[in-house]
Image: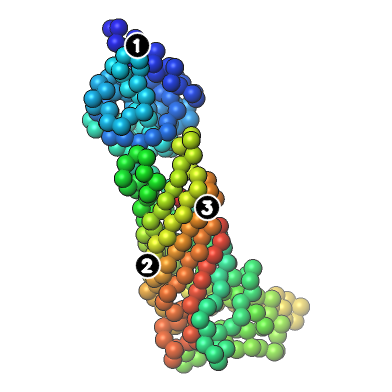
Amino acid sequence: MKQKVLLIAAALMATTTGVFAQNNLIGSKASNQEWIKVESSSLNLAGTETVVALNPSEARGSRAANKEGKAEMVVRQPLTKAASLKSFRHHEEGFYSGTSLFRFGIDIGLNRFLNTDDAGSAPDLKTFGSRYVSLNWSPNFQIGGITSPFYLISGLEFSFNNYMFDDNVVVQDVNNVTEFTQVESVNLDKSKLSQSAINIPLIAMLNFKRADGSNGFKVGAGGFAGYRLGSHSKLKYDENSSTVKLKIRDNYNLTDFQYGLKGVIGYGAINFFVKYNMNELFRDEDRGPEANVISFGLNFLSY
């Protein structure tokens, strides 16, 4: 009985945010991860997990103990409330680990063409009209223990590339060859080629945590591979005092399989990314102009 009283007192002194009692369990702010034999566990108001070991010998590498050394608080990084509650229900009576964290994020940026042929058959792009967007679902796996900054990141990425052409250029599939032609009969408000793809990235990341356990400076690099899901062209222009919009679905001889490199650098929840497609945009030299795609911009919440 005396040990239990000491345990509760030590836990209350260690609490820094939103402590509450639920089913005789104690919750406090989290900052680290560890494997531990769980004696009790809870979730505080901020969605932070806390586990308590009554036996210090079972709390390898834990960070706080009472003066008698009879109780240890072992805490871990914040998760969503749903994920935290689920993991507690599963691990409440066994060994617990928090080495992976599922995240949903978004990339927003721009596209450019690189390595175009000397003949100039690849068109110039409008900078701010050639947008790149991707939706990312990625588990982040921490490698090397609770203090390690090293993570491996993979998952699924749904990407959308838009290439908006300058100089009144339109894209056409002529006898199974993709051609770009400058038109003079109308003044185009919009002329673009769009494609969507599903990708699987694999990125090695160094993520240095701040004192409160949240993300600090991070830098990572890796690659990706994927497959084109669809593509279409779109035209918009005025004719006889009315607006004409044309959308044509076609593969335009775009490469189906995609692969390349990706780099990330950032701080907190905002990151800068660069993504380079090593595959050529079109299937071969006889089916379209030479060009590789580079995308760059901001990432939010993925890492």
Q: Residue 135: percent from the left, percent from the top?
A: 47, 57
Determine whether, in the image, residue 167 is placed left or right of residue 259: right
Determine whether, in the image, residue 11 is placed left or right of residue 164: left
| Label 1 close to label 2 by CB (< 8 Å) | no
Q: Residues within 10 Å of mark 2 (few under 14, many from 20)?
A: some
Q: Nearer the viewer, residue 152 or 228?
A: 152
**Residue that numbered label 3 is attached to:** 266
**Secondary structure state at the residue bearing disc 2:** strand
Quarter-of-image position of residue 193:
bottom right
Q: Nearer the viewer, residue 58 or 166?
A: 58
Is any atom of residue 126 visible in this view?
yes
| Label 1 close to label 3 by CB (< 8 Å) | no
Is any atom of residue 249 visible in this view?
no
- Give the CA separation, mark 1 to mark 3: 43 Å
Q: Which mark is residue 6?
A: 1
**Secondary structure state at the residue bearing disc 3:** strand
Q: Which mark is residue 247?
A: none
- Give the CA separation, mark 1 to mark 2: 55 Å
Q: Residue 236: percent from the left, percent from the top?
A: 65, 76
- Give the CA separation, mark 3 to mark 2: 23 Å
Q: Residues within 10 Å of mark 1 (few under 14, many from 20)?
A: some
| Mark 1 or 2, nearer chain start | 1
**Residue that numbered label 2 is attached to:** 225
Task: Name the mark nearer the viewer: 1 or 2.
Answer: 1
Residue at the top extreme of this rendering = 2
